Image (cartoon, helix red, strand yellow):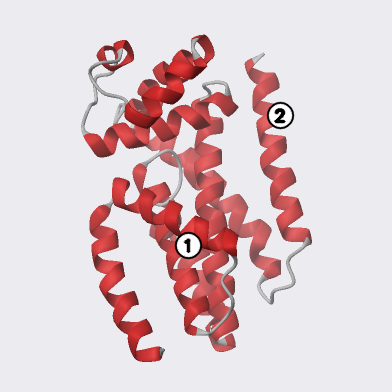
Amino acid sequence: MSIFFAIVNTGIIFFLAYRIWSGDRSSVKNFFWPALTLKLLAGLCLGLLYRYYYNGGDTFMYFEEGAKLSALARSDLLLYIRFLWSGDESFSAWNNLTELQPRAMFMIKAVSVVNLFSHDNYWISSLYFSFLSFLCAWSLVKTMVRLEGSLRYIAVVSFLFFPSVVFWSSGLIKESMAIASLFFLVAIFLKAWMHERISRTEWVLILVNLWLLWNLKYYYLAGLLPIVTASLAVRL
């Protein structure tokens, strides 16, 4: 059964990737599959690094704690949803968790949602986090290239192939989600800089990503917002 779910989820990821790639008309389209493959492999390698070199670590702690909440979802979905929204010591599930620090708890809740799709498979959950991170990096690269065509290879190498950027923003870690949110917000900032229309969906995603970044790595947001605000004020 676990193999079946692994095949299905891997197929979903590559189906979504194919739909995105097939509809892409950018000048960097040829880099899509090599960059995506590298990103997914980086996430898996990160898990192997933590398992066999660090003998555990945050990534497996997030997964194991998230698995406890995904088990709750399968037994009592309404209670699980309430816990995601306002989980505290008044919930019995709270006593089953060992990592209660707010930002870690936020990540654990996010992992639990992904675990529902991966059927509590660490490696498949890792692929989902890597895929999300890749999509945001891909969006940023395309936006940069539209802004200035001469940045094509610089943007591609810097955000899609540079080893430390790719590796430490992949897999089941907080940085994977935080960097994805940061890349998305910067891409939207560049669209505003170019006076491009921001859709209603993008406005909603702006709020979601601000919320994610605040809860995961608020100091990233503290560095980004003053720069974005000052730049747009001068531009507009």
One can see residue 52 in this view = no
Q: Which residue is mark 2?
A: 8
> Image quadrant of residue 119?
top right
Q: Residues within 10 Å of mark 2 (few under 14, many from 20)?
A: few
Q: Secondary structure at mark 1?
A: helix
Of residues 46 and 117, which is closer to you in this image? Answer: 117
Q: Are marks 1 and 2 in contact (CB under 8 Å)?
A: no
- Mark 1 or mark 2: which comes first in sequence? 2
Name the quarter where the N terminus is drawn: top right
One can see residue 30 in this view = yes
Q: Which residue is mark 1?
A: 184
Q: Residues within 10 Å of mark 1 (few under 14, many from 20)?
A: many
Which amino acid type corresponds to the residue marked 1 in the rendered image?
Phe
Provide residue 55's location: percent of width, then percent of height: 30, 27
Image position of 33 with respect to 30: above or below: above
In the rendered view, does 122 fall on the left or right side of 92?
right
In the rendered view, does 174 fall on the left or right side of 160?
left
Which amino acid type corresponds to the residue marked 2 in the rendered image?
Val
Q: Residue at x 56, y 52 (%)?
A: 38
